[in-house]
Amino acid sequence: MKYKQPSLPYSNDALYPVISSETIEYHYGKHEKAYIDNLNKLIEGTEYEDMELEEIIQRTNGALFNNASQAWNHIFYFFSLSPDGGGEPEGKLADAIKEQFGSFEKFKEDFERACVSLFGSGWVWLSRDNNGKLVITQESNAGNPLTSGLTPLLTFDVWEHAYYIDYKNLRASYVKKMWSIVDWDIVSSRY
């Protein structure tokens, strides 16, 4: 198999109480594993077998895109989190956020609004365009800003399986608590 699910850089219970170990076990342990397993089956013996995951995402659609993008999105999401996260970004990313949104608090408000208002399942992203401008985008289902030529910096997963065990149908509560586990060093390094 070409793609392997990386081990998380923290234990399953490390993000509690924001994300429970049960959610990690289902979300990363089962949902993410299924996307990677399906992706490996779909690319076997095809022209995509030796492509980088990002290239598959940019060149395909349908089931292959969905599994490739969901595999990538989940790794990106989980590796943006840390039990030592929270606070605010520093340096160039902090400056760009302040310049474009007015303040970090205003950025968080805009990002949270995008998360709560996305109908159905999907992802909300903070990305950088080729000119360094920051953009918040909503992507339904397996959507990924790579397909629009953007560089993803941060994402919140707003599929119900990301929060239902811990928050039931209270997506807004989940989103507000996520800020305390964002690893801004990682996010800033992507900028």
Image: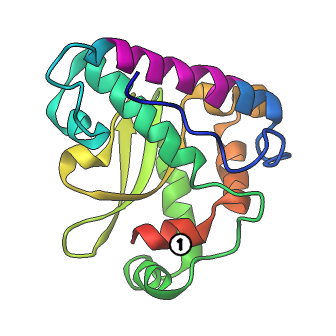
| Rendered residue at 18%/27% (across/down) | 60
Task: Inspect the image, locate mark 1, and give the three-letter code of the amino acid beneath it.
Answer: Lys
Please identify the quarter of the rendering in which residue 128 is found. bottom left
Residue pictured at 78% horizontal, 48% vertical: 15
Image quadrant in which the N terminus is located: top left
- Residue 54 falls in image quadrant: top left
Overall secondary structure of the magenta section:
helix
Q: Give me the residue at 85% from left, 46% from top.
A: 17
Q: Which residues are magenta?
A: 26-41
**Relative depth, front residue between 113 and 168:** 168
Front one among 81 and 156: 81
Is residue 134 in the magenta section? no
Q: What residue does disc 1 label?
A: 106
**Residue 36 on the magenta span:** yes
**Which of the 4 image quadrants contains residue 191?**
bottom left
Q: Is residue 124 visible?
A: yes
Q: Position of residue 98 (x, y in %)?
A: 46, 83
- In the image, is residue 8 above or below residue 41? below
On the image, the x and y values in percent for residue 189 come to 46, 72
| Residue 119 vertical position relative to residue 92 in the rendered view, above or below | above
